[in-house]
Image (spheres, grey):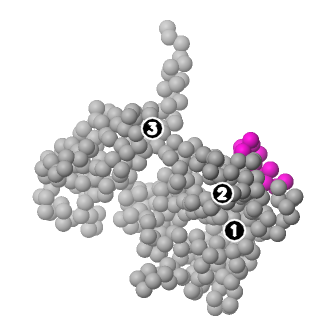
Amino acid sequence: MSTAGLEADFAVRRSERFTLRIRLSVLPGRTVALLGPNGAGKSTVVEAIAGLLPVDAGRIELAGVLLDCPERGVFVPPERRRVGVVFQDLLLFPHLAVIENIAFGPRSRGVGRRAALVRARQWIERLDLGGLEHRRPPELSGGQAQRVALARALAADPLLLLLDEPLAALDITMRTRLRRTLAQHLQQFEGPRLLITHDPTEAFLLADEICIIEAGEITQNGTVEDILLRPRTPYAADLAGCNLLAGNASRGEVAVGTHVLHIADTGIEGPVLLTIRPNAVSVHRTPPEGSPRNCWETTLERLEPLGSRVRLLTGPPLPLAVEVTREATDELGLHQGSRVWVAVKATEIGVQPDDAAARNARKREDQPSL
């Protein structure tokens, strides 16, 4: 493995209105997350680095080898790039068994069939896929299919591991479980790892460094602490200011202290962590029309100007950080002590199991009574 990792500094014009201009570096043994909203250009980055889309200007270099540079007339096709890609929709071959899907990775690099099957069996063992060798993708669970896709990418002995929204298609419970598995295997891969995601939890838990991409450009990069403590854009501020709440879920409701919130996932039960983005909460002077299920009256305890926006801190029954425009603040006549109604859609509440709380609860149950 070369000491050189991924060096990408390129531009791709997708339309008259959108041009991607990106510059990033990923060292071997490091995981960098490219984090951004939908439409920011993340998919274009994946296509360019994987070789599915030639760049219009600049260069892409991996392990000291130039992969794409239009100025020098260099373009290495995808099958020769040694980039292991796990796509969001997995792209497993439905007519092939698990072992054949995994063997396809090394086979695409020119490895003979017998050697490719040996390598596939090794990755089946490493990713705990034993017993599934002869099943086909339609017979697998979401988590199993995700591990098969990861095994196929790793079996090809890549120099770069490129993960495009690798957990997005999974339900919340499976996503949390597989996130831990993915973190373990990322640490074992010696090359550079580039994670593409719109999920801040995924980025913060899996990456050594975060690159925030907005409107085709990287607007901030640094460690998780850098992003959380020193956000440079409103989007980064939203990530840093996410409300994090602990509660107990049952039948689509979560009790957070004395308050109850309705969530979209009715199947999750027990201790959970909730995330609510500040700009996902709407503020009203009177009860909003339509009577949304998550709606309650509260008091504004503090207002903090943030450029063109204002951060509001609400009081009981559920203290939250809320962000609105300065115009909305003036229009509603908001000030410290104002009585307002706040509302948040169930679909805007992120939910994940609170494993630590569940473990502590089991420990208390296991304690002998005196």
**Marks 2 and 1: which is nearer the front?**
2
From the top left corner, tell me how far across and down residue 47 is, in percent: 59, 73
Q: What's the residue at 86%, 64% (across, down)?
A: 112
Which residue is at the far front?
95
Which residue is at the far top?
370
What secondary structure is found at the residue carrying circle 3? loop
Residue in front for this viewpoint, 106 or 160: 106
**Marks 1 and 3: which is nearer the front?**
3
Image position of 182 (left or right of 240): right
Q: Residues within 10 Å of mark 1 (few under 14, many from 20)?
A: many
Q: What's the residue at 29%, 47% (across, down)?
A: 320
- Residue named by callout 2: 94
Of marks 3 and 2, which one's residue comes earlier in the chain?
A: 2
Q: What's the residue at 31%, 40% (across, down)?
A: 261
CA distance separating discs 3 and 2: 30 Å
Q: Amino acid at mark 2?
A: Pro
- Residue named by callout 1: 83
* Boundaries of the magenta span: 118-132
Give the total of numbered labels. Answer: 3
Q: Amino acid at mark 1?
A: Val
Q: Amino acid at mark 3?
A: Ile
In the drawing, what numbered circle is on residue 268? 3
What secondary structure is found at the residue carrying circle 1? strand
From the top left corner, tell me how far across and down residue 41 is, in percent: 49, 72
Residue in front for this viewpoint, 235 or 161: 161
Quarter of the picture holding the N terminus = bottom right
Image position of 324 (left or right of 190): left
CA distance separating discs 1 and 3: 36 Å
